[in-house]
Amino acid sequence: MTSETLIHKDGLYVMQTYSRHPVAVKSGTGATLTDFEGRQYIDFTSGIGVNSVGYSNPKWVSAVAGQAKTLAHISNLFYTEPGTLLAEKLCALSHMNKVFFANSGAESNEGMIKLARKYSYDRYGSGRFTIITLRQSFHGRTITTLSATGQDKFHNYFFPFTDGFRYAPPNDIDAVEALDDGSVCAVMIELVQGEGGVHPLDPDYVKGLESLCRERDWLLLADEVQTGIGRTGKFFAYEHYGILPDAVSFAKGIAGGLPLGGFLVNEKLSSVLGPGTHATTYGANPVCCAAGLAVLDILVNDGVMDTVEEKGRYIRSMIESFRLPVINGTRGLGLMIGISCYGVEPSAAAAALISNGLLVLTAGSDAIRLLPPLTITYEEIDKGLEIFNGTISRL
Ligand code: PLP
């Protein structure tokens, strides 16, 4: 197979719903990928925040292969070991009480939305169902999570969308209060808006939201699909803010490359969803959960999570030190980095970087976004930064 034949065949048989770069990836080790012609790329994307422990990580490979040989799937009608052990670890690391396992970020958020509405229904009866989300947020691609997403460009074509979402501008507590019409049951936030442009929320605002939610018995829901599982240097980004949400969703980095997600809840919510109210066939899949256990072992026991903030600071300070005329500055938390572009389209800058051997993402209207594997080495970072400087200085 060559990259060219693969790309051609894909065009014939796969629905073309993604605008992809002309790169066909064959394999990877650490944060370095190889295409079908043997060309190497430094990966500052980790498959959009998924490959948290890099490619072909020996501990991860051995956990996945071992579990695949033992038991790949049996459904939630029976008990399996990896899911239960992973649940125990996730509860301990998050200071939450119980978990529900799903398979993707959107599904995890759907579950959290159902949780909030059921909590309110059980306690207050019907009519209290509105969930406030933020402008520039992103919560997923199902009909309901598109509705939850506070960007008008996502509210097209697929009418009717799920009712019961209202949007407030970020960092404006009065705007949230102004949306209280008696029908609100929850507020859902990303602590760092990812797809919206890598914008961390203001700490005072987040504290204010927590108090407002407690005062009105609204649930505070944290969508940590992108920010969670060590991405920002803490297990969950809410730890940077000194708050504890009522529920938190996760996905992406948890299983290091396999589809797994879910949401964790505090004690008050631990029995809101009972038998028959929520389910998914693949939830707590043993292979995915074994991968999740390996990821947590690498991030927590091997100390990788403790390196994340320093690596993030290093990348940002190096990029700022290049003094590139088309770069306005950097923002973010840990290894979730936004690079603000000026006078150049982020998509054009990303295409140039990728063709020169550095994979990057874009976010919002102005940013190149970096989400490297958390295990990336300083040698790989330096190689990536050299490509970044060389490419962007020539734009
Ligand atoms: N929530 C956030 C904050 C995300 O960044 C994403 C994906 O980028 C999602 C939800 C949706 O996750 P998925 O694509 O796994 O459904």
Image (cartoon, rainbow, N blue to C red):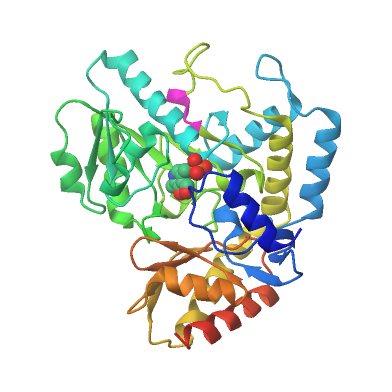
Quadrant for residue 38, please give it: bottom right
Can residue 27 be spotted in the picture? yes
User: Measured from the top left, where is residue 114 in percent x and y?
Assistant: 40, 24
Residue 86 versus residue 12: which sits nearer the camera?
A: 12
Q: Is residue 183 left or right of residue 346?
A: left
Q: Is residue 164 left or right of residue 354?
A: left
User: Measured from the top left, where is residue 40 in percent x and y?
Assistant: 71, 71
User: Measured from the top left, where is residue 28 in percent x and y?
Assistant: 74, 61
What residue is at 68 percent from the left and 55 percent from the top?
53
Q: Is residue 360 left or right of residue 184?
A: right
What residue is at 35 percent from the left and 68 percent from the top?
366
Residue 310 versus residue 359: which sits nearer the camera?
A: 359
Can residue 51 be spotted in the picture? no
Quadrant for residue 49, please give it: bottom right
The image quadrant where one finds the C terminus is bottom left
What residue is at 49 percent from the left and 70 percent from the top?
350
The image quadrant where one finds the N terminus is bottom right
Residue 140 versus residue 306: which sits nearer the camera?
A: 140
What's drawn in magenta, residue-wise?
Answer: 264-269
Judge whether 16 appears above or below 304 on screen.
above
Quadrant for residue 233, please give it: bottom right
Residue 383 versus residue 297: which sits nearer the camera?
A: 383
What residue is at 69 percent from the left and 58 percent from the top?
5
Q: Is residue 359 magenta?
A: no
- The number of numbered discs placed on residues in the rendered structure image is 0
Judge whether 39 appears above or below 20 on screen.
below
User: Measured from the top left, where is residue 185 in percent x and y?
Assistant: 28, 28
